[in-house]
Image (cartoon, coloured by chain):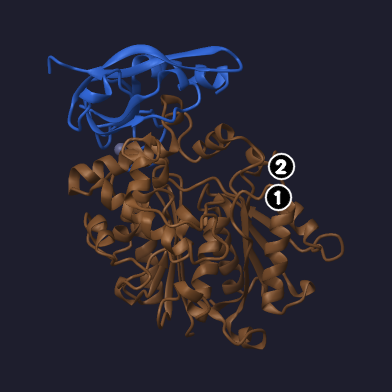
Amino acid sequence: MRDVAIIGIKSTKFGELWDYSFRDIFVEAGLGAIKDAGISGDEINGLYVGNMSGGQFVDQEHIGALIADYSGLARNLHIPSTRVEAACASGGLALRQGVMSVASGYQDFVVAAGVEKMTDVNSAAASSALAAASDREWEGIMGATFPGLYAMIAKKHIHKYGTTSEQLADVAVKNHLNGSMNPISQYKKKITRESVFNSIMVADPLHIFDCSPITDGAAALVLAPAEVAHEYTDNPIYIKASAQASDTIALHDRRDITTLDATVAAGKRAYDMANLKPDDIDVAEVHDCFTIAEICAIEDLGFVKKGEGGKYTEDGYTAVNGQIPVNTSGGLKSCGHPVGATGVKQAVEIVHQLRGEAGKRQVENAEIGMTHNVGGSGATAVVHILSNKR
Amino acid sequence: MSVVRFWRNQVNRYNLEGTHCNSCDEYFYPPRSMCPTCRREGELESHRFEGKGEIVTYTIIHSAAEGFENQSPYPLAIVKLDEGASLTSPIVADPEEMYIGMRVKPVFRKLGESGDKGMIYYGTKFAPDKND
Ligand SMILES: [Zn+2]
């Protein structure tokens, strides 16, 4: 296998982008990444696009071809374009498909991107589309909502480990603070524990401020063989590991309700591949679709002991200036969660950190970063480890 | 959900009918046609669950699922049946009386309705089992 590098990045602004269409945002991200890489379109060998539900959100399938076409890569160049889907982990999966293609030598220059346009439908339709990430026949039809599933994880975590609603809220408070320092983030306002508790209850114990929002956005990366990366950029970021794991689609079939075994497995595979330990990670973007999800993630990735994620969050361990800064972008919670784009945006943020260009949210001396992207309530997990040293 | 899609599992939903693997003695609900432990060596037969069980975890849903709008807020739980399988179900109970570890029993109830087609779904829900 060849080493793979990221040589170009771009994320659109995240938010309710009423003035922009599905096509507008993926063209902006894709062309932005190609421009950042200083590469020309005819050097690109392939496109991998994460998109969860173009069918339900914009009534459009055949996303791969549409994107190649409107990015100017189809009519004359006929560049192959593949959509990949794993619910909210679609973006992480697109990155992984791109990495595997370049690592194998099958393709040299690849764009890995993610896009989701969620605000063209009303919020009920958006919730219904998202519920399709869980088991429609045995969870959805029984009255489960997506927040409801994570609420059941939270309830069990509270029962088993004494995690508190205050600690859950602290995840949101931290991520909004980080988001306030990120130019692309959906929310720029800092919040307090009280703002979380005063927001409406969605599924006990989760308030609406414990949940990531409905977001439009797109993000893209250009991947290249590591040995030629320096011909395109002064600061290539290297992929040290790409790992993925599956678990049961339904939450009720899990070995332990409070552990995402897919995260544990993908994390372990990634650490093994990179020959690194949790201690070695300087900065991480984890999948905080709900506040409890970040607490489970930092435990399941080995940053803290199982059951202690709430306490460590409360103590500032995961803040930008903490021992392991988590979600410096603002995470899904504050930066926003355009489901198919999220996994790619996580990598864009880690590249900013490892290039040392993250501004006020910059983590000092960050050399090794991790991204962690989850599909559904934990049936898919994708973990990447990135480094600015080869 | 379409009528035909619901109809297909109606027997399972009405009677809590799942499967049991004769090779490893594990029980499954919803039913599976392949045992995840034994895979091809597994020997599955259908099994009708007694229906008694215990609440593993729960939530009170305020922002309702499609078709459950007029029931909210409603308790939803993961129930571990005594034979070992776990499932997700609404609980016919006052939100205030819910707790982890509560014993429950099955009750046959309206599950929900699909708005545009007007179809009403029936199936098994669970309720507190005060005698257990
Ligand atoms: Zn078996």
Work out whether residue B76 or residue A379 is closer to the camera in this orientation and state it. B76
Q: Earlier in the sequence, mark 1 or mark 2?
A: 1
Q: Which residue is mark 2?
A: A60
**Chain letter, blue in picture:** B
Work out whether residue A336 or residue A344 is closer to the camera in this orientation and state it. A336
Element class at badge 1 = helix
Residue B129 spot, x, y in % from top left = 18, 17
Q: Does residue A291 lie above or below A198 as drawn? A: below
Q: Which numbered tag is attached to residue A22?
A: 1
Q: Amino acid at mark 1?
A: Phe
The residue marked by circle 1 belongs to what chain? A
Chain A: give its colour.
Answer: brown
Distance from label 1 to label 2 (Cα)? 10 Å
Residue B105 spot, x, y in % from top left = 23, 18
Residue depicted at x 52% and y 52% = A337
Work out whether residue B49 or residue A227 is closer to the camera in this orientation and state it. A227
